[in-house]
Image (cartoon, helix red, strand yellow):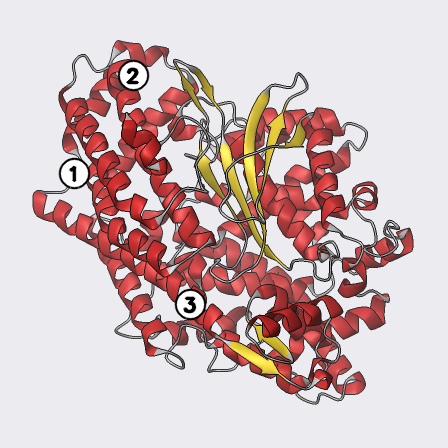
Amino acid sequence: MPVTTANPLLDFSGLPRFDAIQPEHVGPAIDTLLAQAEAAVKAAETVQPVTWATFVDPLDDATERLWRAWGQVGHLQAVVNTPALREAYNSNLPKVTRFGSALGQNLALFEQYRALAAAPEAAQYDPARRKVLDNALRDFRLGGAELDEAGKARYSAIREELSALSATFSQNVLDATDAWSLHVEDRAELAGVPEDVVAAARVAAEKDGLAGWKLTLQMPCYLPVQTYAEHRPLREALYRANALRASEFGDATLDNSAHIDRILALRAELAALLGFSSYAEYSIATKMADDAPQVLGFLRDLAARAKPYAQRDRAELEAFARDELGLPALEAWDLSFAAEKLKQARYSYSEQEVKQYFTEPKVLAGLFDVIHGLYGLRVEPDQAPVWHPDVRFFRVVDAQGALVGQFYLDLYAREGKRGGAWMDDCRNRRDTAQGVQTPLVYLVCNFGKGADGKASTFSHDEVTTLFHEMGHGLHQLLTRIGELGVAGINGVEWDAVELPSQFMENFCWEWDRVQQMTAHVDSGEPLPRALFDRMLAARNFQSGMFTVRQLEFALFDMQLHSSFDPAQDSVLQLLERVRDEVAVNRPPEWNRFPHQFSHIFAGGYAAGYYSYKWAEVLSADAYAAFEEAPGKVAETGKRFRDEVLSRGGSRSAAENFAAFRGRAPSVDALLRHNGMNG
């Protein structure tokens, strides 16, 4: 069809044509694909006999093309945001959302799936197909298929409005971040700030035609200023600007206050419409956890164990800041700075010193070596059209050279790119009549780029982040499941998806691995063993404070979606009560953290932020299997791949874990790894 080559979003013959996609392609492509998908749905409603080949496959064909194209648009909107692309995304979002809602509540399709589940052929299905059927029947109920016509209409309207609100929430955070900058003319104000950050700030100022230095709220600038800047007013200025983003204290057009209230109201209404007592209970219906009280109990039990350690951490930091830094009151913009100074004093260890050893080429080679050691796979450079010159592309191949999957790597922060780090699915594995469709994923980070011709260097935290996202990528890339609905992370309970990612972080703490992935940016020397030992000694430095901070976010999220009553309370009041319960570091009352909490207001973590801690229990226990058999890395890695990564969502996460470990998970390894078991 000529249109296939004319509109790159309609070309599914190979890799996405990211170098050719323009905003004007979005509307026509989505309209074409929606029409094809709707025609496939109409045919599927009445097809007889109902078999996998006559019913499921044609539906998957049409809807997969739509979701793949829309996924490319959503991805570009996150990594190279422009006004024209945003307009194209926002204008097409409602009709895509309407289609998704209509699909989820199509009673005729629901009946066809029921008929298929009851058909004789279903008894012969493998576990993956049976799980697809089970999930489909569950999701039709959760999608409102059993509602009356008025209920369906209201459900669809809620979904559409929620999609628009989430997109606006995320865009407001991005715009508020990009809009702020601080021009510094006096070099003395940048005392302590790492030289690579200062160099990047000078380049940014020159780009704007200014002398001096331009500081921004992009993480490669913001975090080093908070951690190293000696000039306290500078730390305060950036902290305040960051804390007030997308709130009533800034540009009114970017204020997320009303969006938060409306999102919560709509979620509560949606849950009630489907017969759930709260949005949390609706959300947990597709997770490992049983209900909201179980999750709250888990979080509070962990908080009770961690808070004494956090209080000790806080007391030590206050005493050090008072006695050694002359800071009688430890403010929010002093925490990272004082913590870094204390860590240096206690362990003779500086993140900035370590960062000089983690050069990008060595880190990537080290990461790929871990993948080879665990799973016998090679990661090789590959070619593909990309959306920005910084993006690289790789292929993963097995010992025989056969293609397993491919991934894009977009490492650096820039304007127009959403903050944070993430993995997303571009094309999932699928068994087709033409053969295996191999998986394709995006790995995205926001690191600082090397300046003055030097290689980029990463902090150890950034190395850990890269390993984390690669863990998500491997979950997607190493699936052996051929059914779209349960291949990769599809169908995996949301509170288990962090298991493979957090598991990978552990290898950033093994000396043999670290030694191989370091080369000093100037001398080329590997990280000295003595420095690594100091890193290791500092590994659990202030882990109590870090743990209760994560628990604060998780408790806030779960209570917000399970028991929050806007008639009795405000979102900020609820957050303060959660802090009363678990926090040891209290931000200023003007801090507007919820206005930037994209995980729960614009991402997939609503009533699910607890997943990070829940999955941390699983990942620590899974890594303990490698600790228990240090000479059998390849054998243990094969078992982890076979029983967890390759299974996708074809069986429950609890079954996957038990098959790998031979038992249910235990919290002991997590507490031990975090130094909170004594």
Q: Could you say where residue 614 lies in the image, as x and y percent from the top left?
A: 53, 48
Give the secondary structure at mark 3: helix
Q: Earlier in the sequence, mark 3 or mark 2?
A: 2
Using a 10 Å C-alpha cutoff, classify the residue at mark 1 as few (fewer than 14 neighbours), some (14 to 19) or many (20 or more): some
Mark closer to the observer (3, 2) = 3
Q: Residue at (38%, 29%) from the top-left corner?
A: 12
Determine whether, in the image, residue 629 is placed left or right of residue 37. Answer: right
Q: Is residue 371 visible?
A: yes
Mark closer to the observer (1, 3) = 3
Amino acid carrying label 2: it is Trp
Q: CA distance from mark 3 to mark 2?
A: 46 Å
Q: Nearer the viewer, residue 247 or 583?
A: 247
| Residue for badge 2 | 52
Number of the label disc, if any, that sits on residue 146: 1
Amino acid carrying label 1: it is Glu
Amino acid carrying label 3: it is Asp
Mark closer to the observer (1, 2) = 2
The answer to which quarter of the image holds residue 353 is bottom right
Number of the label disc, if any, that sits on residue 175: 3
Determine whether, in the image, residue 203 is placed left or right of residue 174. Answer: right
Give the secondary structure at mark 2: helix
Whether pointer 1 and pointer 3 mark residues with C-beta atoms closer than 8 Å, the reply is no
Using a 10 Å C-alpha cutoff, classify the residue at mark 2 as few (fewer than 14 neighbours), some (14 to 19) or many (20 or more): some
Q: Could you say where residue 76 lies in the image, as x and y percent from the top left?
A: 42, 49
Q: CA distance from mark 1 to mark 2?
A: 23 Å
